[in-house]
Amino acid sequence: MNRNLWRYAAPSVFHPLAGRLWPVFAFLAALSAIAGLGIAFFAAPSDAQQGEVYRIMFLHVPAAWMSMFIYFIMAVYAGLGFVFGTRLSTLMAQALAPTGLLYGVIALVTGAVWGKPTWGTWWAWDARLTSQLVLLCLYLGFIALSTAFEDRERGERASALLAIVGLVNLPVIYFSVVWWNTLHQGASLSASGGVRMEPIMLAGLLAMTVACWCHAIAVSLVRVRHLIAQRESGRAWLGRNDGHLQGEAAS
Amino acid sequence: MSIDWQLLWDMGGHGAYVWGSYGVALALLAAEAIALWRAGQHGRAA
């Protein structure tokens, strides 16, 4: 069992597997997004305090969660690559970073757009917003560092170190609304505080979260295939896999 | 069930905020998809 799992750590085995998996996740993402958006705009009632503008939350909250989850997974992969020197871990970390950055930007932009009519300002140097901005800088730093050195391995090691050190920012983001008196509201959904929203709103939020998860997995699999293809170009197995996949697509 | 599209578009006077934020997100996601597709095309050509 373990031996079977470990074989997927080889780029030559993972490359065709990712090629078969990404369309499945893309399809699931589209399906969940249709369900989530349907609930968000047609089934969920207006919020008693915020009115209709709260519907931005169906996008903002999953995007903010994804930016943190992806960072965590990226740092774990980068750490594995740093410690064990596994090629695929490093490539997975590099494949995840742009998608994590994208979700971070979506979270900040949608948060600002929600903040204007709700708080009366686009931006405040609030602990939650600032720590989320730091996360964005960490993503940018990771992406920049991994390509900043002529010696690729040095860049990969430096970016892995940054990713690991940056992990400290995740609890700061999560607990910022507890530790400090912030403008940002507290969690409406947490393990300790339970669920403080209508079940239909929760259903919409969860459907959108599944959509974001599946989207992130799909695009990361496509990106890691490109990275593997770049890194392993010229290897015989890559030509064989491409031929195999083209054969599959044709049949 | 009939949908009042005007009401949906208006979003209680916050239509620009709601649809604007979804529009920006969609544009960013589309840009990422296009960039990936182009990277794939470029990789195949190389």
Image (spheres, rainbow, N blue to C red):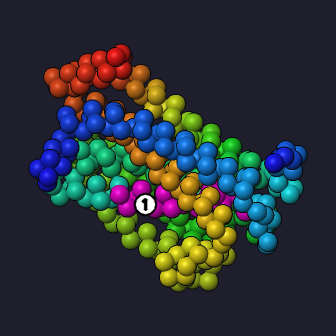
Residue A126 in percent (x, y) is at 62, 73
Q: How many marks?
A: 1
Q: Observer-nearest residue: A237 or A111?
A: A237
> In the rendered structure, which amino acid carries the disc numbered 1?
Phe
Does residue A232 lie above or below A162 as drawn?
Answer: above
Please name whichever residue, A69 or A214, is drawn nearer the observer in this view of the structure: A214
Asked whether, in this view, residue B22 is left or right of residue A89, the answer is: right
In magenta, the rendered stretch is: A54-73
User: Residue shown at 44%/74% (left/top)?
Assistant: A171
Picture layout, residue B38 above or below residue A28: above
- Quadrant where the image shows the C terminus of chain A: top left
Q: Position of residue A75 (x, y in %)?
A: 33, 59
| Secondary element at tag 1 | helix
**Quarter of the figure with residue B29:** top right
Q: Is residue A96 magenta?
A: no
Relative depth, front residue between A40 and A103: A40
Residue with the mark numbered 1: A69
